């Protein structure tokens, strides 16, 4: 069983919700990314989402865009991130997803990417600019190899599209809590609960909510409505504020632990 599916099966038995932490790979460097993943695992993070830095993002807000630019200048690329995951598998067993854009996957080669990702220990991939209507061959091959392709559902998604995504999606459905890019928000979307009810009418797959969630109170409130909560920009911003600090990893890991209430 894929590690993501196994994780949600375990969480269901325990009556728990998933806490998913996003960080930009290579920010501030790949060695620190490795240490952060190991530290997050010890702090009870359920799934890690590693962002593949890209120069022309569509979904990332200013905090993650800045981190991606920094990481790219350090020479981070898809190959190095896959090698990082392979090395991490000696130390962690928690599920690891890559959030990337289609261009790096296309340049690497779809089948080659899937084969390499699975061989390195990647469990899922999120590609915001590859809609399921255009990804039939990729999804079919990923399914054959056991790599979960995780799709976005947005507040503007129609019921017909939610049904399509529910049919092809593997692992969990990623609900984007707002119409906009990633980044902290002071309050949750007013239509969050109603939209999650709509999605639950057409799927029994786990639903995880991301975008705009930045503090422990918001994590707690959202986790009452779904199967998992994803926090990204707040964690990346914590990294940004501690670049150069000798205890960066510990400070960020403690922050992540404080979110996971």
Image (cartoon, rainbow, N blue to C red):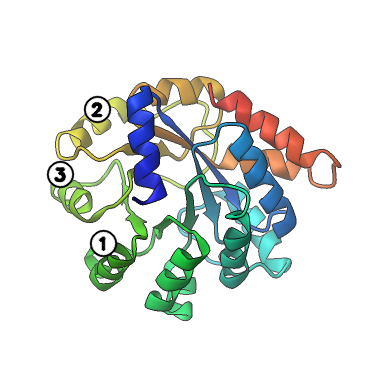
Position of residue 6 measured from the top left corner of the image (x, y, whole percent): 37, 42
Q: CA distance from mark 2 to mark 3?
A: 13 Å
Q: Nearer the viewer, residue 146 or 171?
A: 146
- Which circle marks residue 159 in the picture? 3
Mark nearer the viewer, 1 or 2: 1
Q: Residue at x 60, y 53 (%)?
A: 24
Above-or-below relation of 115 to 124: below
Q: Earlier in the sequence, mark 2 or mark 3?
A: 3
Instruction: Please report the residue visible at 22 percent of the width from the left and 52 percent of the height from the top.
Output: 165
- Residue 226 visible in the snapshot: no
Mark-to-mark CA distance, 1 and 3: 15 Å
Circles 1 and 3: CB distance less than 8 Å?
no
Distance CA(mark 1)–CA(mark 2): 24 Å
Left/right placement of residue 118 relative to residue 207 reads right
Judging depth in this view, the residue of 170 and 75 nearest the camera is 170
Q: Residue 142 falls in which quadrant of the image?
A: bottom left
Circle 1 residue = 132
Tag 2 residue? 194
């Amino acid at each position: 069983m894929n590690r993501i599916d196994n994780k949600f099966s375990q969480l269901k038995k325990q009556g728990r919700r998933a806490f998913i932490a996003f960080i930009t790979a290579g920010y501030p460097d790949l060695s620190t990314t490795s240490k952060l993943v190991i530290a997050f695992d010890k702090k009870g993070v359920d799934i890690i989402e590693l962002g593949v830095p890209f120069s022309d993002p569509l979904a990332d807000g200013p905090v993650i865009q800045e981190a991606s630019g920094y990481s790219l200048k350090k020479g981070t690329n898809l190959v190095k991130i896959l090698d990082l995951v392979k090395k991490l598998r000696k130390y962690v067993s928690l599920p690891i997803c890559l959030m990337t854009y289609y261009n790096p996957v296309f340049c690497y080669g779809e089948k080659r990417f899937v084969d390499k990702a699975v061989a390195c220990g990647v469990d899922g991939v999120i590609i915001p600019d590859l809609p399921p209507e255009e990804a039939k061959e990729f999804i079919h091959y990923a399914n054959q190899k056991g790599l979960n392709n995780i799709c976005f559902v947005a507040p503007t998604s129609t019921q017909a599209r939610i049904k399509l995504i529910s049919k092809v999606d593997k692992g969990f459905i990623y609900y984007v809590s707002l119409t906009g890019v990633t980044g902290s928000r002071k309050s949750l979307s007013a239509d969050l609960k109603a939209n999650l009810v709509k999605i639950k009418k057409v799927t029994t797959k786990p639903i995880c909510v991301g975008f705009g969630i930045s503090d422990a109170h918001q994590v707690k409130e959202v986790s009452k409505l779904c199967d998992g909560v994803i926090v990204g920009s707040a964690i990346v911003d914590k990294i940004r504020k501690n670049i150069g600090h000798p205890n960066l990893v510990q400070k960020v890991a403690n922050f992540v632990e404080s979110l996971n209430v």
